[in-house]
Image: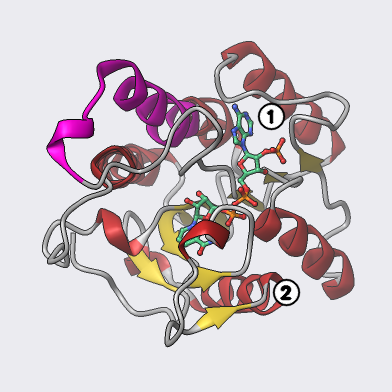
Amino acid sequence: MVFGAGGGIGGAVVEALRALRSFEHVVPFGRSTSPAIDLLDEASLERAAAVAAEKGELRLAIDATGFLHDERQLPEKSWHELDAAKLARSFALNAIGPALLMKHVLPRLPRKGKSVFATLSARVASIEDNRLGGWYSYRASKAALNQLVHTAAIELARRHPEALCVALHPGTVATALSAPFAKTGLEVHEPSAAAAHLLDVLDRLSIDSNGGFFDWRGQRIPW
Ligand SMILES: NC(=O)c1ccc[n+]([C@@H]2O[C@H](COP(=O)([O-])OP(=O)(O)OC[C@H]3O[C@@H](n4cnc5c(N)ncnc54)[C@H](OP(=O)(O)O)[C@@H]3O)[C@@H](O)[C@H]2O)c1
């Protein structure tokens, strides 16, 4: 299952999985698929998980949804820009929506054999790595996502000892999300390359990686 299949990275992950042919079905979900998902509508997430589960064992779920900016909201440069409604919106999309996805997907993972739920977080969520400041809503909502992933991973291990629940940083990827912040000198990956990196990392992760936060090279990121 791929959530956020209409996004830059999510779309590339769907294409990469189809090309791999390792899975019997690749089931994309987005706001324009049928059934559609909306992170703000829990019933749509539950329905998507159930629809995918009907097709066979759920071995891999990738959540490539996420929110940084749109016409209503830009990342904050200063505490002067903090706004309760905008903070709440970032948390709803980047932390609460993915948490509800975990609620409906994790119990459906197989009890035996490797299976993975991976959600796309961001290195800027790392508290230890935060030297620049700014981007309050995005950083904090993705840090909340990391804590939700780590907590769910502990519960998951009790009944699904071979399953993994992890957070991944895809690197800087040329998508609509990163476009307004493109700077020269940054290492920027095409979505197809990012998808290949992420699938390679997921393939290499072993059970001691459950609950962790990894970058596109497979290296652990400090919390
Ligand atoms: N690009 C980067 O450099 C970069 C760096 C670090 C982390 N990330 C993370 O990687 C993930 C994917 O980002 P991207 O670069 O591929 O961005 P993107 O192209 O903007 O994709 C974002 C995805 O989130 C989905 N989404 C947003 N609001 C939603 C909602 N209410 N309900 C359901 N889906 C919703 C969008 O769905 P629609 O297709 O329906 O609009 C889209 O599929 C995000 O979590 C982002 O934070 C990206």
- Please indicate whether residue 73 sits to the left or right of residue 9 in the image: left
Closer to the camera, 134 or 118?
Answer: 134
| Residue kind at label 2, given as amino acid type | Ser
Q: How many marks?
A: 2
Residue at the spot 43% in from the left edge and 30% down from the top edge? 99
Q: CA distance from mark 1 to mark 2?
A: 25 Å
In primary-sequence order, the first of circles 1 and 2 is 1
Locate residue 5, reporting x and y percent: 74, 47
| Residue kind at label 1, given as amino acid type | Ala
Which residue is tagged 2?
192
Which residue is tagged 1?
49
Magenta stretch: includes residue 98: yes
Q: Quadrant of the C terminus?
A: bottom left
In this rendering, which labeled residue sits more in front, label 1 or label 2?
A: 2
Locate residue 106, reporting x and y percent: 52, 36
In the displayed structure, 103 sits above or below 111; it is: above
Asked which quadrant contains residue 52, the reply is: top right
